Image (tube, grey):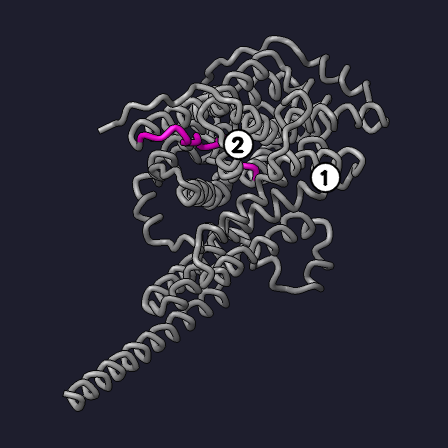
Amino acid sequence: MDKVVHYPWYKKEDTDAFFSLFQNNLANFVIIVVTMLGMGFPASIVFGKVIPGAAVAVMVGNLYYAYMANRLAKKEGRTDVTALTYGISTPVMFVFLFGVLAPAYALTNNYELAWKVAVAAAFLSGLIEALVSFSGNWVRNRIPRPAMLGALAGVALTFIAGEMLFNVFSIPVVGLVTFIIIIVGVVGKMAMPFNIPTSLFAIVIGTILAFTLGYQSPEKIAEGLANVGFYPMLPSFAVFEGMSLLFTALVGLLAVILPITIYNAIETMNNVDAMAAAGDSYDVRECQAVDGVGTMLGAIFGGLFPTTVYTATVGSKTMGAGRGYSILNAIVFGIAALTGVIAALSALIPIAAVAPILVYAGASMVGTAFKANESKYFIAIVIAMLPYFANYMMTRFNSSAGETVANISTGIVPLGQGAMFTGIILGAVTVFIIDRQFVKASIFSLVGAALSFTGFMHAPKLAFNAAPQFSMAYLFVSIFLIYCAYQHSASTAKDIGHKSMKRSVAS
């Protein structure tokens, strides 16, 4: 039965967590705005359709996860439950910008049609994730936690903590000062002047320094304010119009949508598992369904980016947040999208002032991966992390410096393709080898062979026999592990026989 507890709507710890989540979402919204305007998409589509639609998805998910936190608090009789953080998936966002939206425009040469195709792709992605949710707990229970958390830690270390640390040091007089404020307040538990929340204090100081020292131009504020207005959140038939193109002239985009959606579902699964390790256990199936439904609703209102449970959830947990930060995030983003304030905020706040918050969130996730597992599994965690180093090099440098990347190693690109799957497979195989469960290790290697054969791993696109060398390698590994299982079984039986004989002699 549910226990009677007073689970607060809002508490002071929610403020820091709100700014952490808000800036994470804001950074994504800023990237969307800058990228789409840079591609030539008119402001009427960007601020009038895409941003309001994306905000609808963010609002729906944040409010529902606040509801889930309240339900868990009552069920377990606790007041220290933290709501899951939620928003646009950063890696998936880049794929939809450059792997769906850009090709759609290149093929149609029409911004309106390209937007409709991308909206349809997002809706389809949400539908697939909602369907995948039925098997979420089954998959979660069969993938070792060190493998899941290790693969997630790889994302956190490279794309979140690592890349954001680059931004910190891009303007050190802003970023480094802000970073130390975050460390002192959040990690060192020191109160800021006048008890101002650490994240807010850091952002204010960073922004003041940027403007005072000339790193942020007042002209950009005027540009941002020019886009302030009223942008109502209105549903449209764009999804259905874009779907007809998606399944005809642009059917090739499905090869991008399917694997990235499965990645997104796994990302949610990993982040929910990380939260369970931190103390709050949510149903992964329900979370995947929420992400899928949130993405579909956002698409109906014009958004074109799938949503996910964030890595930063653990950071919010360590801050002691409850559900209030999630509710506040939904309200603020709704208002910001309706009024166009996001454009002004993106011009006002320098990235170097908000990056330290994400560095902390990413570092927290890496720490949790090790903290939540026995020391004997640390090697498996590290191995699961490594594919994302290749993925980072591939996504950031291969398009402009492919020859340089190839000269470092020809294995970088194939290792980076499908890094989430590769990390989980290698991590799981290592965990089962450590536990001497060689048959399970062999099964995961067979899964690796199947994923490589179909192009989910080590290949640029989905196809039959997409990565023959890799699928063959995983197959050989699977056979070897079956041999190891036989040898281990024989050795165990022999040891039991020796012990039985010794007991007989002794008696």
Give the residue pinned by disc 1.
167
Relative to 348, say whether 493 is above or below.
below
Q: Nearer the viewer, residue 67 or 16?
A: 16
**SS of the residue at dot 1?**
helix
Q: Nearer the viewer, residue 48 or 1?
A: 1
Relative to 301, say whether 142 is above or below.
below
The magenta stretch is: 77-90
Q: Nearer the viewer, residue 429 or 360?
A: 360
Give the residue pinned by disc 2.
88
Tell me if mark 1 has few (under 14), some (14-19) or many (20+) residues whose alpha carbon lies within 10 angstroms of its own.
many
Image coordinates for residue 229, horizontal then vertical, percent:
64, 9
Quadrant including the C terminus: bottom left
3D distance between C-alphas at marks 2 and 1: 20 Å
Image coordinates for residue 449, horizontal then vertical, percent:
42, 63
Image coordinates for residue 367, horizontal then vertical, percent:
54, 49
Q: Is residue 494 visible?
A: yes
In-image side of 187 versus 454 (left or right): right
| Badge 2 or badge 1: first in the primary sequence | 2
Residue 466 magenta-highlighted: no
Question: Could you tell me which residue is drawn at 61 percent across and 25 percent down?
Answer: 197
**Do the residues bearing badges 2 and 1 touch, measured as CB atoms within 8 Å?**
no
Quarter residue 163 falls in: top right
Quadrant including the N terminus: top left
Q: Nearer the viewer, mark 2 or mark 1?
A: 1
Residue 88 magenta-highlighted: yes
Image coordinates for residue 128, horizontal then vertical, percent:
38, 37
Residue type, mark 1 in image: Asn
